[in-house]
Amino acid sequence: MAKTRQLSLETRQSIVVLRKEGYSMREIAGKLKISIHAVHYSLKRKEATGSNGDRRRSGRPKTTSPAEDKYIRVSSLRNRCLTCPQITADLNNTREMPVCSSTVRNISVEQG
């Protein structure tokens, strides 16, 4: 199955408006020249979320909060002798989900 491009916001809004006017999914697909499945999934998403906005997120979600990022940066600047595994161990004492040392290294390189 090939990836297809995402429907524009205007198209998704048009789908909802046409559906409220009483058009069937097949008629909407014909008018807008898109597949019936696209109409179906757009209406289904609108019902589930109440919004037509983009829900796609690019990349993996961050594991650390901005406050934890700041803590990592400040710790490494205050004591230059600390290694990433030492900062990681200190950070993991206060967290439920542990953070790996490569995450700490990436954050310190990114910010410093």
Image (spheres, rainbow, N blue to C red):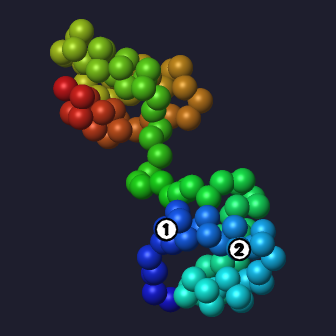
Is 31 situated left or right of 19 in this image?
Answer: left
Q: Position of residue 57 (x, y in %)?
A: 48, 54
Q: Position of residue 19 (x, y in %)?
A: 75, 73
Q: Please tell me which residue is depicted at 47% across the width and 46% down the height of the picture.
A: 61
Camera-side residue of 101 and 1: 1
Image: 107 above or below 70? below
Q: Name the secondary structure under disc 1.
A: loop
Camera-side residue of 6 and 71: 6
Q: Which residue is mark 2?
A: 18
Is 67 situated left or right of 16 in this image?
Answer: left
Q: Please tell me which residue is depicted at 71% across the width and 54% down the height of the picture.
A: 49
Image: 112 above or below 45? above
Image: 77 above or below 49? above
Identify the amino acid type marked 2: Leu
Question: For residue 111, which quarter of the picture?
Answer: top left
Does the image show residue 112?
yes
Q: Which residue is mark 1?
A: 8
Separation (CA) of disc 2 from disc 1: 16 Å
Q: Please tell me which residue is depicted at 32% across the width and 40% down the height of the picture.
A: 102
Q: Position of residue 99 (x, y in %)?
A: 45, 35
- Furthest residue in direction top, as rendered: 78
Camera-side residue of 24 and 78: 24
Q: Residues within 10 Å of mark 2 (few under 14, many from 20)?
A: some
Sequence-wise first label, 2 or 1: 1
Identify the amino acid type marked 1: Ser
Q: Name the secondary structure under disc 2.
A: helix
